[in-house]
Image (cartoon, grey):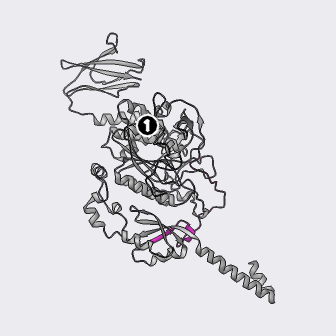
Amino acid sequence: MKFRILVIETPNINTMKIKLLFFLFFITSNYFVAQTIEDAWVYFKDKPSESSFLATPITMLSQRAIDRRTRYNIPFDSKDVPVELSYINQIKNQNGITVFAKSKWLNALHIQGTQIDINNLLNLTFVASVNFADKSLNSGGKSILKNRFVEKKDKLDFATNFNYGNATNQIQMLKGDVLHQNNFTGEGMEIAIIDAGFPNVDTYAAFQRIRDNNQILGGYDFVNRNDNFYTGHYHGMAVLSTIAGYVDNQFVGTAPDAKFYLFISEDDSQESPLEESLWVEAAEKADSLGVDVINTSLGYTTFDKPNYNYSYSDMDGNTTFISRGAEIAFSRGMILVNAAGNEGSSSWHYISAPADAVSVLSIGAVDATGTIAGFSSYGPTSDDRVKPDVDAQGANVYIINSAGSIATSNGTSFASPIMTGVITCLWEAYPNKTNAEIIQMVKESGSLYANPTEQEGYGIPNFESVYNTLNIETLPNESNEASIYPNPIKDKVTIKFPKNTEEMEITILNLLGKNMVYKSVLKDKPTLDISYLPNGLYMMQLVYNNQVSTIKMLKN
């Protein structure tokens, strides 16, 4: 407006100079705006080769992935089909366009180019739409920048204090030790960790056990497009340690016998929407390999270019590229566990993407006593769903740090993999349960399930109660032998009567079988309260139908 007033009120030679300078400034400014390199996604209308791929699923997925689909009755569909190669090549050949990532699930490419060059892609007959990371550039779009300060935080930043010890509390808090004691330690299960890097996993002693047992199946660096995944930021290594680390008598991860794929999608040197696309690529790779569980201790809200920043309204599970990809990953049969975020004390305050996705199990952080950590991000989602879902220890939690030593650290980054390991062990115990069934039972076991809060969600889950419930469901009804569950036992033990058995004499003796601590005949009360017994090993003698069965029982 100042320029316009100046032009009207100064009709002389200087006015003409000012007009010309203003005109040149206007043209130059618009030229540079038009030449700014933008991030965007281009979406395609179809997949011409769909029918041939669907006819031969092994060309898209590994046998393990196909077996998972069969087990859970998940049909193959167009999302499994690769992006049409001819479309990719045509986009690559367009002037000014660079392709950085692709997604078969969303049938899209992540590209960079000027606004003009990207919009010109709409002239191609196979292009359905383009979506700029800067929403103001989209048709009918608006800027998502708020009139408030958005704090930029390094989501990989966490302070480590050397303090040698063990990881007992972080496992026992979730009752994950009950699964371990019943020999469910992740064996036969596969976990993908998508993170920022895994340096020294190939050398540190804390990972020697998984190396010696060939539990690292492979990985990939999607940022640098190479097979060297033992590089990057040590955040991913620390995350892995809470699941797979092992130091004799000092440290045990929550799923020490699982197998792992290690994927790098996070570029520690910058914050860009491209990282979302690389994450989706990694998740697609995990699916194609037949991975069971994905852990991600990353989250996205702000970027190096403020125009790309998300607002709280975008945390609805449907807006961000990464959250939409995560939802599809769940539909393929995997369980996805994600850190809720460490913004509870910051100006952002809320969870990040993809923790906002409906089917992602988002994890908040508590301390060793079960008290919520102040840094743990708040929910709900912008569409008013409970998030985070559940909590695990993430304050003063034990990890393997960048020096390869046992240390304490803080962050939902570690609450998430601790939970991932325990969930993996539970699914190992009950592989016929679907991902949705496992997650729902974990939520329902939460200490706050009846009254969730904005920061704690459903609270701390109890995997012992989930395990016992599923144990009851899966016990055979026509067995000719007596059995007990759970074992180990905390307070109560249930005796499963064999078929055609109406009563049973129960005797509990100490481990040497000399001192009787309990004896009774049970008819209609097969559950015993043994909370009064000291912790230790006992022998339970069951007499029924002229038979005697002896079972070793652990009380803890």
**Does dot 1 land on a helix, a strand or a loop?**
helix
Considering depth in this image, is 306 or 444 the residue closer to the camera?
306
Amino acid at pointer 1: Gln
Residue 532 at what x, y percent from top left?
42, 18
Task: Indicate whether 367 appears above or below 318.
Answer: above
Asked whether 168 falls inside the magenta stretch, the response is no
Residue 268: x and y in percent read: 55, 53
Is the stretch drawn in magenta largely helix, strand or loop? loop
Is residue 402 something that shows in the picture? yes
Horizontal arrangement in the rendering, residue 41 relative to residue 160 (left or right):
left
Left or right placement of residue 303 versus residue 526 in this view: right
Q: Quadrant of the N terminus?
A: bottom right
Tell me which corner region of the image, top left, top right, bottom left or bottom right, holds residue 185.
Answer: top left
Residue under pointer 1: 208
Name the residue: 42% across, 17% down: 534
In the rendered image, residue 9, in percent from the top left (x then y), is placed at 80, 85
- Can you name the residue that lies furthest to the bottom here? 12
Residue name at image x 59 percent, y 39 percent: 160
Q: Position of residue 326 (x, y in %)?
A: 43, 55
Q: Is residue 403 above or below residue 314?
A: above
In the rendered structure, which segment of residues is drawn in magenta?
A: 129-157
Residue count near mark 1 (Cα–Cα under 10 Å), binned few <14, some 14–19, many ≥20: some
Looking at the image, which is closer to me, 10 or 190? 190
